[in-house]
Image (cartoon, rainbow, N blue to C red):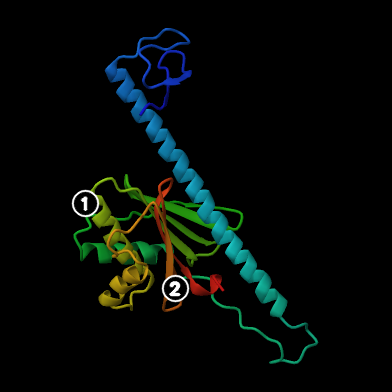
Amino acid sequence: MSILIHCPACKKKISSAASACPKCGQPIDEQTRVECVKRAKAAKIGCLVIVVVALVLGMIADRCGKKEVSVQDKTPSPSAPMGVGTAVKPDPTLKLTLDDFISRFNKAARETTISITLSRPKIQPGSVNDVAQAVPAKYLSFIISMPKGEKLLNGITLLAQPKREVESARVILAMLCTIAAVDPGLPPKERGQVLRDLGLFKDNLNLRDYKAHTERGGIKYFVSASELIGFMFAAEPAHLHP
């Protein structure tokens, strides 16, 4: 199947099946074609990652905003008697810092055959949430968010586009390590049960269009998969999803 690539001479978009650029006449030999196709696919994946990051941050900001409005609506006026109409504001975080997550994930990873280590990423400030992105492998990345100016995390999202069976196995192990990091008190057997409840061990699972969620210990876990963006696994405080 042909795709659009850039002519190495005039930079115009042409078909990868073309033997020469119809704009400037530049010959397109097989080596040039392969290199241009690789660059085009890499650019496409980069754009998809940016879109997914924006979508994830938008969902987190929307949930946090809705929860804040809900809490404010239930807050009594200064003249209201104490204990009447009051609402305790739930903790909007996962109760761990970025350093906690990195340390716990790497500790869990050392106990498996995952061969993946997270380095501490740089925190990028945002309007609602600050964000850090870790990319331990070409097929795997993490988007880690926290309320603006705060240290405790309010969301961890794993994005994956495995191409080989061994990479798919490592993604599953990365999910188990993520669960161990956000809830270290959860027994290993229960971590596996989280993935079973998400339906990830079903036979003939269709990951071209799949969504599921489950909850453990005040943490809600999500999976979403599509042919366009690949696979996404997330952990967030359960109360963000009434």
Q: Nearer the viewer, mark 1 or mark 2?
A: 1
Q: What percent of the width, then of the height, locates residue 211?
A: 43, 61
Please give the name of the residue rendered at 36% of the width and 71% of the height, measured from the top-left corner.
Answer: 197
Which numbered marker is on residue 166? 1
Please give the name of the residue rendered at 62% of the width and 70% of the height, measured from the top-left corner.
Answer: 67
**Label 1: how many Cα within 10 Å (few below 14, some 14–19, many 20+):** few
Q: Confirm whether residue 100 shows in the render.
A: yes
Q: 150 or 238, which is in the foreground?
A: 238
Image position of 177 with respect to 31: above or below: below
- Tag 1 and tag 2, C-beta contact below 8 Å: no
Q: Name the image quarter holding residue 172.
A: bottom left
The quadrant of the image that shows the C terminus is bottom right
User: Three-letter amino acid code at disc 1?
Assistant: Val
User: Three-letter amino acid code at disc 2?
Assistant: Ile
Is 97 placed left or right of 188 in the picture? right
Q: Residue furthest front?
A: 204
The mark nearer the N terminus, 1 or 2, is 1
| Secondary structure category for the residue under label 1 | helix
Image position of 206 with respect to 45: above or below: below
Which numbered marker is on residue 219? 2
Is 239 placed left or right of 186 in the picture? right
**Label 2: how many Cα within 10 Å (few below 14, some 14–19, many 20+):** many
Q: Name the image quarter holding residue 109.
A: bottom left
Q: Confirm whether residue 148 shows in the render.
A: no
Image position of 35 with respect to 238: above or below: above
Q: What percent of the width, then of the height, locates residue 82?
A: 71, 91
| Secondary structure category for the residue under label 2 | strand
Q: Residue furthest right?
A: 79
